[in-house]
Amino acid sequence: MGWIRDFSQQEGLVPPSRNVEDAPQPMRQELIDVFFSLTEQNPRTIEQDRLHRVICQSLGVGASANPYGGFRYATGRDIRGVEWPRVYDLISRLWPEFTGHGLGPQFRDSVNRVLAAHGVAWDLGPDGRLHRVLPLAAQAQINAAFTELSVARYVPALALFNAARDAYDDRPRRDRDACANVFDAMESVAKEKYQRPQATFGNVVAHIRQTQALNEQIIAVLETINTLRNRNFGHGMAAPFSLNPTEVDFTYLVCVGAILMFTRTP
């Protein structure tokens, strides 16, 4: 499936920013081409009538046994009228259909070429879920934090971290939940690291200052993040959430960085 968007990708004709939270109509039609091209190139895997039925039923549309114009045309028509999040739901729904026939890598690569070409904010991951696109260095931090938390002592923190990542990857993104859960994950790690299960994050930071366990300026950053949380997305706050998208990115990634610092500090 390397021919999908082959020329434009080789020429670097891909939008530099990946922030579109929509499913543009041209992109929808390209995705239909991806889906049916895979079945056409691999005719002994998924039959086109089955693919058509799965797509229609997933989108909540009635499927015709012999649609006018053929399966491609009918499916392209049906996908035009659905709300944009349903397009991404469809990608996730088709993942097991193609992976079940050994076509997962081709499906993922082709879908991601189309998503990148239209500058949308998500990529299809190897787990079959759509994840928000981050700079490579930031994505490496996310992956590293997941690995660090995948041990028994950090099970509660991992649950919060996954909740934060789900909120961050959601369509549309749930900014307040992303900030609150990633902070709680960081707090859980800090409490476990310094053996203060009943303490607040502020208490843990005060302990770190008292014992000089970290650099003074790093401690100041942790205190500032704690103040940011208390004033903007703490539990039980009734005030409207007001951090803008770039401030959410900053908060999210700072907390991820702190998680790595706590888990890796001797």
Image (cartoon, grey):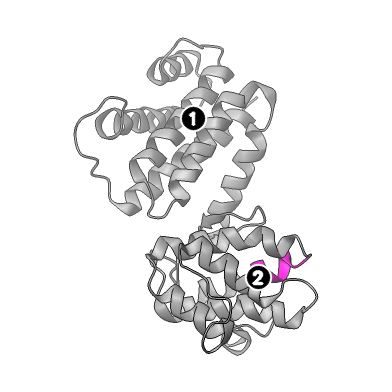
Question: Badge 1 is on which residue?
Answer: 186
Q: Secondary structure at mark 2?
A: helix
Q: In the rendering, at what x and y percent does residue 261 appear?
A: 56, 33
Q: Which amino acid type is marked by label 2?
A: Arg
Please tell me the numbered disc located at residue 81. Answer: none
Q: Can residue 14 be spotted in the picture?
A: no
Q: From which residue to which does the magenta span run?
A: 102-109
- Dividing the image into 4 quarters, which one contains the C terminus? top right
Between 44 and 99, the one lying in front of the other is 44
Q: Which amino acid type is marked by label 1?
A: Met
Q: Main secondary structure of the magenta part?
A: helix
Between 68 and 179, the one lying in front of the other is 68
Residue 175 located within the stretch drawn in magenta: no
Question: Badge 2 is on which residue?
Answer: 50
Q: Answer with the quarter of the image where residue 144 lies.
A: top right
Q: In the rendering, at what x and y percent does residue 119 appear?
A: 45, 72
Q: In the rendering, at what x and y percent does residue 75 appear?
A: 51, 77
